[in-house]
Image: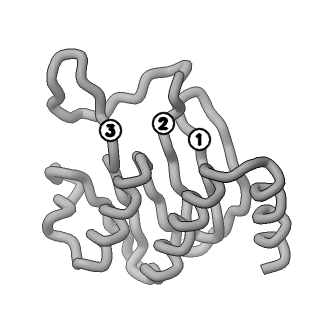
C-alpha cells in the first residue's frame, strides 16, 4: 500500500491538491471550511481519542486524524508557505492519505468533528461513548 501527501502548491515531496482525484479534493475542501489544518488517514493503526498539544487540537477516529490549530497556541504554527506580512496559514495545509482510504468514512469523521466541536459537553460525552461501542 502507498500513501500520498497533498499540499496547496505541491513540492519535491508532496503533490499539489489540484492534481488529486476529485474525491480527495472534496475531503480537502470540507476540512478547509472547518478550519482543519492537517488530516492524516492511516493504513492500519486506529485511534479513538482527542488530544491537545502545544499547537494543535487533535481529533482521532478510526484511521483518520484531524488537527486544528489552537486559538492561542503555545508554539506557533508555521508552514513553509508564502503569506503576507502579519498573515497566517489558515485552512488546510497537508493531507496525508493512504491508497486504501474510504473517502466516505473520512468525510463522516470530518462531519463528526464538526458536531463534536460545535456542541456542548454532554453531546461530546455521548459521542465518545458511542464511538467506543461502534
The quadrant of the rendering that contains the C terminus is bottom right
**Residue named by callout 2:** 69
Compute the Cα span from label 3 to label 2.
9 Å
Q: On screen, 115 above or below 3?
A: above
Do the CB atoms of the residues marked 2 and 1 lie less than 8 Å apart?
A: yes
Label 3: which residue?
A: 90
- In the rendered image, which residue does mark 1 sit on? 57
Q: Nearer the viewer, residue 118 or 88?
A: 118
- Alpha carbon of mark 1 to alpha carbon of mark 3: how far? 15 Å
Q: Looking at the image, which residue is at 42% across and 73% down?
A: 98
Of mark 1 and mark 3, the one earlier in the sequence is: 1
Indicate the position of residue 19 as horizontal and vertical percent values.
14, 69
Along the polypeptide, which appears first: circle 3 or circle 2? 2
Q: Quadrant of the N terminus?
A: bottom left
Percent across and percent down for residue 68 are 49, 43
The answer for how far apart the CA atoms under marks 2 and 1 are is 6 Å
Amino acid at each position: 500500500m502507498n500513501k500520498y501527501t497533498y499540499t496547496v502548491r505541491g513540492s519535491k515531496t508532496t503533490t499539489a491538491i489540484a492534481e488529486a482525484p476529485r474525491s480527495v479534493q472534496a475531503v480537502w475542501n470540507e476540512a478547509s471550511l472547518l478550519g482543519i489544518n492537517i488530516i492524516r488517514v492511516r493504513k492500519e493503526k486506529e485511534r479513538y481519542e482527542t488530544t491537545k498539544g502545544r499547537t494543535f487540537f487533535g481529533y482521532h477516529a478510526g484511521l483518520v486524524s484531524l488537527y486544528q490549530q489552537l486559538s492561542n497556541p503555545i508554539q506557533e504554527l508555521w508552514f513553509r508557505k508564502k503569506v503576507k506580512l502579519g498573515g497566517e496559514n489558515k485552512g488546510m495545509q497537508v493531507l496525508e492519505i493512504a491508497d486504501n482510504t474510504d473517502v466516505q468514512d473520512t468525510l463522516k469523521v470530518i462531519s463528526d468533528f464538526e458536531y463534536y466541536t460545535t456542541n456542548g459537553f454532554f453531546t461530546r460525552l455521548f459521542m465518545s461513548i458511542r464511538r467506543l461501542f461502534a
